[in-house]
Image (spheres, rainbow, N blue to C red):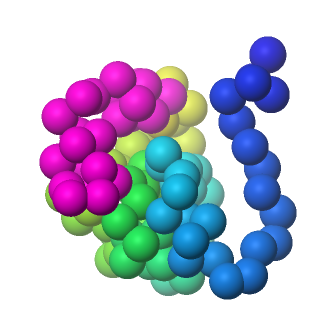
Amino acid sequence: GLGRHVVLMGARFPIAPWLAACDVLIAPGVNEGFGRGVVEAVLAGTPVIASDDGGHREAVIDGETGLLARADDPADLARRVARRLDSRTWRHSSPQGRHP
């Protein structure tokens, strides 16, 4: 039933307008380097929810530019995604309505 709620976009160019239109970028990977997609999402003002591991720690300021979930903990990741999607304050805290 996720097809009604999740869109896997595939490759897009230029990426900035696509990222800015997203409600959230989810980066659950562990042992990731400094992920360009996460950085581009932050720069586009799109909230990021990422695993608290590797390069994500360098790109995401927990509670400010996104949320960091415990690595390899799908339940924690899901809670943080739900928190973001349910938070009216978080959704509307920037002029673009995109920062957490």
Q: How many marks?
A: 0
Residue 5 or residue 82, whichever sits in front: 5
Residue 69 appears in view: yes
In this rendering, does residue 71 appear at all?
no
Q: Is residue 6 left or right of 37 when viewed as pictured?
A: right
Indicate the quadrant containing the N terminus: top left, top right, bottom left or bottom right: top right
| Residue displayed at 42% across by 72% down | 44
Q: Which residues are magenta?
A: 78-100
Instruction: Point out the residue furthest to the top here.
Output: 1
Is 49 drawn above or below residue 89 in the view shown? Answer: below
The residue at 80%/28% (across/down) is 3
Q: Residue at x 55, y 77 (%)?
A: 16
Q: Nearer the viewer, residue 27 or 92?
A: 92
Task: Identify the residue at horizontal 70%, vertical 36% (top origin).
Answer: 6
Residue 50 x %, y % = 46, 54
Q: Is residue 89 magenta?
A: yes
Residue 87 position (above or below residue 21): above
Image position, residue 86 (x, y; %): 35, 23
From the viewer's perspective, is residue 70 above or below residue 4?
below
Give the left or right position of residue 46, taking residue 26 as reference.
left
In this rendering, position of residue 20 left or right of residue 42 = right
Q: Which x, y percent locates residue 98?
A: 33, 54
Query: Residue 92 falls in which quadrant of the image?
Result: top left
Residue furthest to the front in view is: 95
Residue 13 drawn in magenta: no
